[in-house]
Each structure stands twice: as C-alpha cells, then as structure tokens.
Amino acid sequence: MRRFLTAAVLLLAVFGPARAATVGEDGLHKQSWFAETFLILAEDMAEAAAKGKRVAVIFEQKGCPYCREMHTVNFQVPELTDYVKAHFMVVQLNLWGAREVTDLDGKALEERALARRWRVNFTPTIVFLPTPEEMKAGETEVARMPGYFKPFHFQSMFEFVKAGAYKEQSFQRFLQHKFEDLEKQGKKPKVW
C-alpha cells in the first residue's frame, strides 16, 4: 500500500492534477477534446486545414493496456496535450468497431475494415493524414505511430508531422537532431 501511495504522489507531482479520460460504452478511453465528426475523412481533413490543423486518426481497442497508458500517462502531460490540441484534429476509431467511415477515396466501410485496409496491426496506432494539397499529389498518409510511444517521443512525432519534417528525413533522424539541439542548449530531455 505504501508503494502505491508513493507512486500516486509521485505521479501527481510530475503530471499535476489529472485531465480525466472517461471510458465509453465501446470500452475505449475518451478525451473530451477528441473530434466528434461524421467520419468522412476528406471532410475532416478539409475542416482541420481550415483551422490550420492536421488530422491524426487514432486506432484503439477495448482492453488495450498501451491505449490506457497513452490516456493515463501521455494525455496527462499538459504541454503535450496542449500541443496536440493546438495543431491536430484527433479522430478516434475502434480497431474492431462497426461505425461507418468514409476513406479518403470516398469508399465507405466499417472501422474494422478500414483498419485492415490501412494495415493497422497494433493499438494504439496513430495515422497522420496528409494536407489537402498533399492528398492531391497522391499522399494518403504522411506518418504513422505504430504502438505506444512514451511522452517525449510521442510529442516529438506530433512535432515531426506538424513541421513537415517527414518530407526531408525519417523520424529517427528528426529525433537525433532534436537530441543534438537539446544537448547544445545544455538540456536533458525527459524520456522516462
């Protein structure tokens, strides 16, 4: 019991008061700021672009321990959550769900069929959609986060996409440069 209380106090000290995530009827953790849309992805992309944002599609599944970790750890870091909310429209899909989603090519299918079509194998998986201009050039996905990333790498992936760095380099190279820049500034990143 003492270890549990110590861990709880430590988590509160590190992350501050929790920004609660609820669990929906589908068993997925929910964030109040996730986008509620008609799941017509081209329209979501256009709406996000009009607000200066990009679309990030998160696939999750009921009982996924890494999805829970994303919600109870990553989305409890205010700077990280604020960054994502400021620059991305997040659309949550259920890996096994039956809601109708219209893919970027106009094809309507269930969430689970879209997951298969997009070759989503892990949860959480975040698929970053192109801008409308990139889509016209044939892009259907600009980056993918296949599984759980700890907060530093999680936010770095969102920064990588926001900056358009995927056009010039891999995510690994982007991270290497970020570490080098922080080192030059005498800072040590908190990578848990």
Image: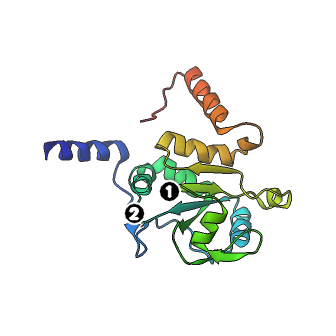
Residue that numbered label 2 is attached to: 21
- The number of numbered discs placed on residues in the rendered structure image is 2
Give the colour scheme shown: rainbow
Q: Amino acid at mark 2?
A: Ala
Question: In what quadrant of the picture does the C terminus appear?
Answer: top left
Q: Is residue 59 above or below residue 78?
A: below
Residue that numbered label 1 is attached to: 123
Q: Position of residue 78 (x, y in %)?
A: 45, 50
Q: Residue 173's image quarter?
A: top right
Q: Residue 160's image quarter?
A: top right
Residue drawn at x 66%, y 64% as measured from the top left:
117
Identify the secondary structure beneath mark 2: loop
Which residue is farthest left? Answer: 1
Label 1: how many Cα within 10 Å (few below 14, some 14–19, many 20+): many
| Nearest the eye: 79 or 172 | 172
Q: Position of residue 89 (x, y in %)?
A: 61, 62
Q: Amino acid at mark 1?
A: Thr
Residue drawn at x 45%, y 34% as measured from the top left:
190
Residue drawn at x 77%, y 38% as measured from the top left:
168
Q: Is residue 176 above or below residue 165?
A: above
